[in-house]
Amino acid sequence: MPEITKSYEPNDVERKWYAAWLKADAFACRDAAGRKPYSIVIPPPNVTGVLHIGHVLNNTLQDILIRRARLEGRSALWIPGTDHAGIATQAVVERELRKEKKHRTDLGREKFLERVWQWREQKGGVILEQLKALGASCDWSRTHFTMDPGYSRSVLTAFVDLFGRGHIYRGKRMVNWCPASRTALSDEEVIMKPAKGFMYQVRYELADEPGRYLEVKTTRPETIPGDVAIAVHPEDARFAALVGRKVRRPLGPPAEIPIVADAAVDREFGTGALKITPAHDKADFEVGRRHDLPAIDVLHPDGTLNELAGPGLAGLERFEGRKRAAELLKDSGALVKQEPYENNVGYSERANVPIEPRLTWQWWLRYPRVEEAKAAVRDGHIRFHPERWTKVYLHWLENIQDWCISRQLWWGHRIPVWYRRGLDRDTLSEADLADPAKVHVSLDGPADPENWIQEEDVLDTWASSWLWPFATLGWPDRAEMEEAGYGTFYPTSTLVTGPDIIFFWVARMIMAGLEFTGPEEERGCPLTEAQLLARIPFRDVYFTGIIRDAQGRKMSKSLGNSPEPLELISKYGADGLRFGIISIAPQGLDIHFQEERIEGGKNFCNKLWNACRFRQMSGPAGDNSDLDAILSRIEPARFDADDHAILDRTLATTREVERCLAGFDFSAAVQAMYAFFWNDFCDWYVEVSKAKLQEADSRDSCLAIQDLVLRQALLLLHPVIPFITEELWQQLGYGGPAGSLIEEARILNASQLAEALRGRGAVLDRAQVASVESMKTFVSQARALKAERNLASRRDVKFLLTAGDAEWAIVDAAQAKFQRMAGAAGLERSGAVDGAPAAVTPLGTLYLDLAGSVDTGAERTRLTKELTALDKHIAGTEARLSNEAFVSKAPPAVIDGARKQLAELQAKRAETDRLLQALG
RNA sequence: GGACCCUUAGCUCAGUUGGUUAGAGCGUUUCCUUGACAUGGAAAAGGUCACUGGUUCGAGUCCAGUAGGGUCCACCA
């Protein structure tokens, strides 16, 4: 076995082990027979994506769950993959084309798609390689891509099925149109942002009364050519006489448009009169429908104004057009006023440009299983962590609108609908759509393709990823499902994702799971609770926080505040990064990223490394190859208080980690492990071991205990920091002579471990454990006595102790340890030593034997301060105990505690006071 | 406009069902390169728990309100 190096150098170790794990096929799911399954599907990153800090958090959490499940002996499966990300990917390739001065239409659909596939072969899925650098233990042999043939078939199957049962229809409606991507978007893909602009006040001349005007306010004068009416509130006395008359449109092709009355108008807002432009505003569209008004679309799909906008505006880009429109209105005298104005404007989330409400033909989905999806979460069949997201989820489902699932893109799943050649798809009625002679809907297309033309649109990417939890398990093909272990792994166990995609993805997956899993003949049938439980896609959903920078701002490319994960990995190691990010990720809150915390993760790894190094340097002490071998080396008859205490802490920490992980409180689990390892083990047990190891009697058992503790610590830590724990596992021989991987070991839970110890006769003694606490305080006070006099480096200082027999027995048994821990030459029992620096400890009054040179003034100050604090505390406790109500109403245990505490405080006070008097 | 979250040490956060003197990490100060680790060790300083009321023998913790910060949802031109 090579000697462990002085400091931990993660990079080579990590590369080495990841390769070894892959070679050993360590992440492939083992045979499920007789094991409880545990499965996770990765939230598929965009195939265009690169690893960012959010992925680091998200995937580390999943890896922790999966690796822990493996250590618990479960059949653990983590399915990886990527999402074809329609708009984003198409945009990337279009950008490449633009450099070649080409547009996708120059290539045509087929060539363009070839080009996209080419791109994805060469550059797509980089992120999966990056996840390997992070240590993600996905079963890579099961990597899925939403555009793979098998997955695509699942997507089309779902479409055909929903269409057949009337959930999907085609309709001309107002949609959110992205002029940059030239496609419709769903409501969820639109984000509202405040935008600075102007409010224009424009006057419309009454057609039958020249010289008289009706004024309206608008932020979008370029749409005036699309105006078809002016609306006022039916009960607005100011305009009552005008309703039914006409005004002249002040811009665009000349026209007279009616004044209508509609209750949707807010009398208080603006002038009280509203221009109605049905083609460019959702609310106006509704008004237009009510009054049977036409819709005049003045925009091209790319957001430039078309010929209907009139010669002055046609051809202009929409914001240019707005400026120009204002100028034209001003020139004609129709512009009354123009003032700066800020309002909320919908932006395309992807392209980051304002969307246009636009009237187009699209495919829509009436969501299936809405009620069951609500019930699944409301009734706790699916548990959200933190729980409060339940409300957000339910609220969205309560107000759910049909989903626009068609996209005017080429990259995506082309909608499996064929129109009979010669038919105009935009004139088909619902009845036509259901007529197989006119419209063909199937997976494989019509038998006589020459007579049909396939729908041009593709599906929204989310309309494929909503099938992820079961499409990745072979659905709908029976044989594939069998092979993929659908019966074992569905429903999956836990979903780890961000709350930002609760609507996009989580809610839709739940509905899809409820709708599509289970026997085909039960589609759409009411579900029993048992059926519901079998169909939900996951049992638990853990929502991570959003990572922000130290100032609380969102991570963004433009701010440049987003740390580069691969750089962090090379700087701190993947383990350091993992440990650090988990330790700062509080449950349910956003995370303030601080690189110092990642450094802390690296430091912890180094601490772990060196503790193991110390163990190795202490020499071999017997068989380390498995837990039984280590247990058999333990000699309970030789246990001292510290042995009891460290074993007690090991059990307590094991229990605590179990508890935290069960509640998805990862940072608390990491904190518990940190405190245990650093404070209990390194700062105390390893230090006292240095005395114990000097003695032949206690040496072997002490090393066995170290092995037991280190082994358990490595197992507890492995899910969080897999690389270093694997390396140390092997270095210390816990993998046996064959070097079996740490993943092949089984972690014992706290009660199993306690049972194993009892089996060896090791019964932990509370009193001994408690005595170590006293000893720690005692040592600490001894160190403080030295430090206050700048004697910390002096090891020739003697201590004297006035103590009862019981206390002295504890201290005397630990003489060698005390000398090492406090840096003392010795500790003797003595009577009171007047005038010497002293501290009142739980084990007696401790004096620093300073042979004369005492700064009496400083001592007096220190003791007086101590006395003041004691007095204050005593007063508080006395006041409580003399309160009649407290004594009669508080539980006896609390009262007893207070009495006991008071007695202790008084004793301590008396002793402190005596010391002070003795100073003279 | 509606819903939710946050406010505890200089910073980032813990604080279980209300119960001794409110904790940790980082940062700060002082001391220490002793044979695991200076990516370290030791000691210390630092908090009217945002504010105001209420419930209670007892409130950081429960309730109501106020202020500040944040997130999501919502068609006011």
Image (tube, grey):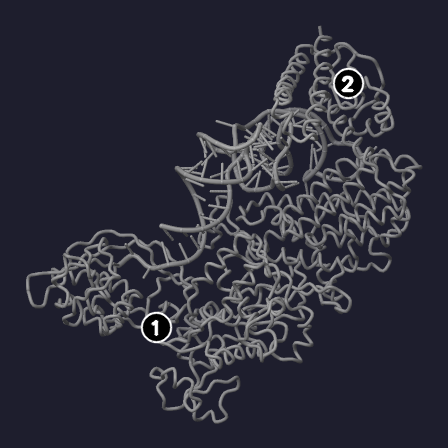
Q: Secondary structure at mark 1?
A: strand
Q: Secondary structure at mark 2?
A: strand
Question: Which mark's residue is nearer the viewer, 2 or 1?
Answer: 1
What kind of residue is marked 1?
A: Arg
Q: Tell me: residue A601, above or below residue A738.
A: above
Instruction: Look at the image and tell me in which quarter the C terminus of chain A lies.
Output: top right
Residue occupying the far top of the picture: A920
The tag on residue A173 is: 1
Residue A404 drawn above or below residue A657? below
Residue type, mark 2 in image: Thr
A883 or B40: which is nearer to us? A883
Q: A250 left or right of A183?
A: left
Instruction: Decide: is A753 above or below A800.
Output: below
**Measured from the top left, where is residue A147 in percent x and y?**
54, 75
* Mark 2 to mark 1 CA distance (whole Å): 86 Å
Q: Which residue is mark 2?
A: A845
- x and y percentages locating residue A662 in the rendered image: 67, 52
- Check disc 1: other Cα within 10 Å, few if <14, some if 14-19, many if 20+: some
